[in-house]
Structure formats: C-alpha cells, structure tokens
Amino acid sequence: AQKVTQAQTEISVVEKEDVTLDCVYETRDTTYYLFWYKQPPSGELVFLIRRNSFDEQNEISGRYSWNFQKSTSSFNFTITASQVVDSAVYFCALRRFTSGGSYIPTFGRGTSLIVHP
Amino acid sequence: DAGVIQSPRHEVTEMGQEVTLRCKPISGHNSLFWYRQTMMRGLELLIYFNNNVPIDDSGMPEDRFSAKMPNASFSTLKIQPSEPRDSAVYFCASSLGQLQETQYFGPGTRLLVL
C-alpha cells in the first residue's frame, strides 16, 4: 500500500521568510514518481514538479527547491523569500512507475500555506 | 495551448436530480482522470481512462456514479440521482500517457447538492 503524509496541515509565515513543506511517503515499489501540486485560492491544481525515484538530485526553480531523500522517504519543498502569492494549499503525491496494471496516485492531505504581508 | 477544460464551473442542484460534468482533455493526451476533492476525504481518484477505455474505476463511490469517454476529446461524469454528500469539487486531469505521469488538471467543477 502507498501512503503520503504531509504532517503540517497549516503553516503561517510572514513575507520574505523561507518555508519548508514536508512530505513523507511509503511505498513497496522500487520505482515511482513523486509530485508537488499547488492549489491557489482560485481552486485549480497547478503542477509544480515531478521526480522519479531514480533521480535523487535536488532541483531548484527560481524561489522553489525540492529535496528528495530516498533514504528517509521524503520529498520536501522549500520556498525561499516567500511572497503573498505563494499562499495556497500544496499537495505532495506518489504514483507507481511500473508498466501494466493500475496507476492510481496517492495524494497527501495537503499543507495550507498562508503568507502574510 | 488550451489546458484541460471543464464545464460547468459551478453547479447547484437539488437532491435526486441528475448531474453531468464535462471534460475536454488537452489535445494529444490519451489518459484522462476524474477526481473528487472534499474536506473530509481530500483528493480521491474516481476513475481513469486510457485511449478512451476505462482502466480502473475502483474509486467510483457507488452505482449512482458513471463515467464515459466516447472519444479522445470528451468525457462525462454523471451522478444520478445526486445526494447532498456528493457535494465536492470534481477535477478532470489528463496526461500524455499512463507512463507519462504528469497529470494536468482542469479548473474543477464545484458541485453543491441541496
């Protein structure tokens, strides 16, 4: 069985602070994909990043960075110098990689990030 | 390029009525997914199609829910009869293939059943 845990239900920061959103996952698969999605107040889900289990390199995209640690089954997301527009619910997700069969993804419950001006 | 298109964006209906949600995936994508999001249960996958064929519908809550994909550019999710507990945001997502795991989501349909 797969499981994604986002232990932080809500985080509140002041603009320009750095913030890290935690994601811990469980899977028996040796190959899998991990994702982060952003859901702003408008409601749509916006894809941020996909990482496959073969690639443990950290990634940086502007103010966003992701730290994938296979040894601890974590895929944490850091926003540097947060801005009010970063206020949203962020979802971490896990999906199987293997061919054939079902590809049902597992989503965490989300972390609500509130950035105050 | 147009993203995933869903209609209607908002739907308010009375218990017992039939509700039909519509989705147009991104052109060229051959996998389509229907999700439901509620405060209680979070984001749940209801059903997904690959090349217009339903692959896994184990997430469909009960027989009142049905989904079809008559062609590569259109899918519907129908609830008949609707109940207040069906109130949720329903998302449609598409991806280039089952192994291309990035799913792109539509804006969602916010359903309220009174």
Image (spheres, helix red, strand yellow):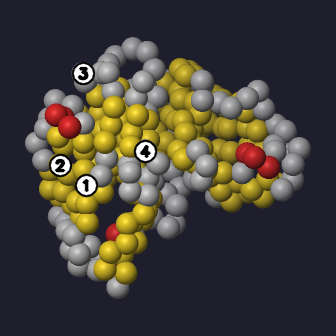
Q: Which residue is mark 4?
A: A108
Q: Residues within 10 Å of mark 2 (few under 14, many from 20)?
A: some
Q: Residue at x 22, y 70 (%)?
A: A18
First along the sequence among labels 4 and 2: 2
Q: Residues within 10 Å of mark 4 (few under 14, many from 20)?
A: many
Q: Is residue A67 left or right of residue B36?
A: left
**Quadrant containing the C terminus of chain B in the rendered view:** bottom right
Vertical placement of residue A62 versus B23, above or below: below
Q: Residues within 10 Å of mark 3 (few under 14, many from 20)?
A: few
Q: Which residue is mark 1?
A: A77
**Residue B24 in sight:** no
Vertical placement of residue A93 versus B70, above or below: below
Image disc number at residue A67: 2
First along the sequence among labels 3 and 4: 3
Q: Is residue A2 left or right of residue B79?
A: left
User: Which residue type does callout 3 highlight?
Assistant: Thr
Chain letter for mark 1: A
Q: Are marks 1 and 3 on the same chain?
A: yes
**Residue B36 in sight:** yes
Q: Which residue is mark 3?
A: A30
Q: Is residue A24 left or right of residue B74?
A: left
User: Which residue type does callout 2 highlight?
Assistant: Asn
Chain letter for mark 4: A
The CA span between labels 1 and 2 is 6 Å
